[in-house]
Image: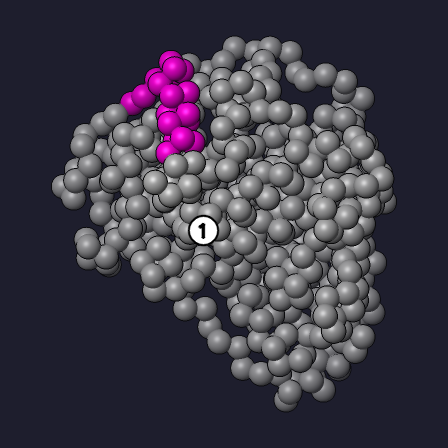
Amino acid sequence: MKKNESSRRRFLKNALSLSAATVIPTIITNKVSGRDMPESPLASANERVNIACCGIGSRGGDITSAFYNTGLANIVALCDVDMGAPHTKKILEAFPDVPRYQDFRKMLEKMDNQIDAVIVGTPDHSHFPICMMAMAMGKPVFAEKPLGRTFTENELLIKAAKKYGVVTQMGNQGHSGANYFQFKTWKEAGIIKDVTAITAHMNLWRRWHGWDTGMTGFPARHPVPETLDWDLWHAATSHHEYDEDFVNGQWRCWYEYGLGALGDWGAHIIDTAHEFLDLGLPYEIECLKADGHNALFFPQSSTILFKFPARGDMPPVEVTWYDGVDNLPEVPEGYGESELDPDIPPPGNGMIQPSKLNPGKIIYSKELTFKGGSHSSTLSIIPGDKAKDMESRLPEVPESPSNHFANFLLACKGQEKTRSPFELAGPLSQVFSLGVIAQQLNTRLVFDLETKQITNNSAANLLLTGPAPRKGWEQFYTL
């Protein structure tokens, strides 16, 4: 038996033994068949990809619907630790006869031969074990952004994707939109060149704004909803008593479970620059501002500086990140208006509160300055008279042949390559992990690009991996 196959089987045996040893409610409905489940329109039955969806409420529900609406997928399994809660009912009602599980390990074990690919729309802290198990089983994986919560989790996800040779995609959907193809085309044509600085900004209201920044401990215990398996919700992280400010999107507020505004929005703002400027990892990261700094949850506003080295004939780049309602960056003369990208999904409360400056970026090169929004928003050259002078030199930009969800499914079928595979999305997510460490400790970090270690702060270096996984989840962290 080949070494990779032997380690794969050992990993799966350990994961499944944990599943069997843990008493977790499992809900199974009718057997999957073409008659028992809703079939996507458009594509014929033998052309569709059978997908299992982990996380079916809120954003997880949105991406479940998005995959179904491509016409290229059948939904063959649904999994959520809070199965039957109000935020999962929309998907459950849409797919009433599809098998349901609360434990992803049991779902993958029982339905292995019926699943072609796995979709992960769970909180940040639980992306990692689901992805690792699915890839070890040879399943293509689509995971929401950011990939893993820690630097090490992202490193292992990159290595696992390469080891198991599966199709992967991170869910920063703008990476299949107009901005992706424009940035690529303008870079190849020499319009975007010699970039030296990028300002990235996200100044919308966040869930933790207005919280008591003097908080020294997690909230007091509250009754656990009957529909929720609270122990399984934690995955590999340490167990805390239940509070509603941990779930339904509130997990993003806490360092222990999410990556804050940077991890949430950075993948929609910095992604194309990171890929096409070949930024890789920074050698220095400094938290310049952290108003309302707290050891448990994210600041009210933050400014984080990332320094990237020269790459080939490209000069060093400094990326400065701004978040917080009133923490606005300076904008250059001739900036004009800031528009909100229409592709931004609405938050849980159904509305985006307006900001003085909508999410986006300003890219400074030696000759030109560009401004852009988030997600699929295209870049424009500023000021306007410079844009008019450049108009005749701008190359034609091709349209996207597929949205981000269809791109993944077509890649599963061997017809396209994913645009945000783990080999690209993993290092981008590592940038966010490093930024959050600097933010959490409110300090400056020096990062060795060869050893991938933080050399000036031992406490920060330990946070690259974070606390050890709790008992029973260790096998997910070994390749």
**Where residue 137 appears, x then y in whole percent?**
36, 39
Q: Quadrant of residue 262?
A: top right
Q: Residue furthest left?
A: 35
**Residue positioned 61% across, 30% down in the render:** 257
Residue 33 showing in the rendered view: yes
**Residue positioned 76% across, 26% down in the render:** 295
The residue indicated by pointer 1 is 168
Residue 14, magenta (yes or no):
yes
381 to 130, vertically: above or below: below
Q: Residue furthest bottom?
A: 392
Q: Quadrant of residue 374?
A: bottom right
470 to 136, vertically: above or below: above
| Type of the residue with mark 1 | Thr
Residue 374 showing in the rendered view: no
**Where residue 431 appears, x then y in whole percent?**
68, 48
Q: In which quarter of the image is residue 106?
A: top left
Q: Give the camera-side residue of 66 and 75.
A: 75
Q: Give the camera-side residue of 225 and 171.
A: 171
Residue 303, magenta (yes or no):
no
Horizontally, is 455 left or right of 114 in the view? right
**Where residue 400 appears, x then y in whole percent?**
45, 68
367 to 455, vertically: above or below: below
Horizontally, is 123 left or right of 24 in the view? right
**Residue positioned 66% across, 16% down in the render:** 219
Horizontally, is 344 left or right of 331 in the view? left
Part of the protein shown in magenta: 9-27
Horizontally, is 460 left or right of 237 in the view? right
The image shows a total of numbered marks equal to: 1
- Looking at the figure, which quarter contains the N terminus? top left
**Where residue 437 appears, x then y in whole percent?**
74, 37
Q: Taken as a whole, is the magenta stretch helix, strand or loop?
A: helix
